[in-house]
Each structure stands twice: as C-alpha cells, then as structure tokens.
Image (tube, grey):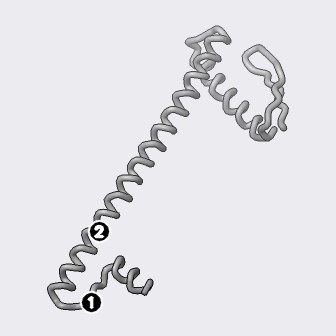
Amino acid sequence: MGLLKIDALGTSFTIKTGEDEAYLKKLLKYYKQITEQIEKNGSLSSNTQISILAGIMLCDELYKEKSKKASESKAKQKEDETLAKIEETLDRISARLDDALGKKSTRKSDAQTENMD
C-alpha cells in the first residue's frame, strides 16, 4: 500500500492507494512535468485551468495509446485470418495435386487423421 504526499499547483494533500509508492512518485513527477510545461506556455494563469488542461492532455495521451493498441490488435486479427485462409488454400491445392498425381495426401489434416489410426 502506498502513500503519496502531493504538492502541486498551490495545494497539498496525501493519498493512500494499493499502488507501489515508487510508482506513485513517478506518476506525480510526470504530472508535474505536464503542469510545468503548461505554466511555461503562459497562456493560463489559474491553477484550476492548468490542472484541467493537464488532465485533458493526459486523457489525450491515453486515448491515442488505446486507439493505437486497438488498431494493432485489429491488424493482428486480420493477419491471422489471412494466414488461416492461405493455409486452407494451400491444403486444397496440395490435395488436388496429390489426387492428380495419384499420391497419398500430404495435407496436414490428413496426416493428423492418419496418426490417430
């Protein structure tokens, strides 16, 4: 269980969570980097505005990362489906060649069946 004292944007408080204390300190450091970046920009003067913008920026990062992972997952799924179709096609071609040449089938599915006998 971790305790973290937060001193940011003119306020101070302590939180208690189930997370590791070192992890919480990394999060706070990252948050402070973002708020300092906003403060340096100088377009916002209110700590509330800075805090809200920092939250939106973090949400933006998270959303983009989740979208990227979802896209990668969909691409992987499509790739797996394509490979399965290629394997099926190769099995059919192999079977036709074997039939045409009068040979015993070399398809994976037939080989697995023969091993069961």
Q: Residue at x 29, y 63 (%)?
A: 85
Residue 53 coordinates in the image, percent (x, y): 58, 18
Residue 90 lies, with reference to residue 83, above or below; the image says: below
- Residue at the left extreme? 100
Residue 90 lies, with reference to residue 103, above or below; the image says: above
Residue 61 coordinates in the image, percent (x, y): 53, 32
Q: Quadrant of residue 1?
A: top right
How far is the residue under mark 1 from the one under mark 2? 18 Å
Q: Earlier in the sequence, mark 1 or mark 2?
A: 2
38 horizontally vs 102: left or right? right
- For the residue pair 107 and 45, the one nearer the viewer reads as 107
- For the residue pair 17 and 40, the one nearer the viewer reads as 17
Residue 92 coordinates in the image, percent (x, y): 23, 73
Q: Nearer the viewer, mark 1 or mark 2?
A: 1
- The three-letter amino acid code for the residue at tag 1 is Lys
112 horizontally vs 1: left or right? left
75 horizontally vs 6: left or right? left
Q: Residue at x 40, y 80 (%)?
A: 112
Where is mark 2, residue-wise?
A: 88
As drawn, the label of residue 104 is 1
- Residue at the front extreme? 117
Secondary structure of the residue carrying tag 1 is: loop
Q: Residue at x 75, y 40 (%)?
A: 23
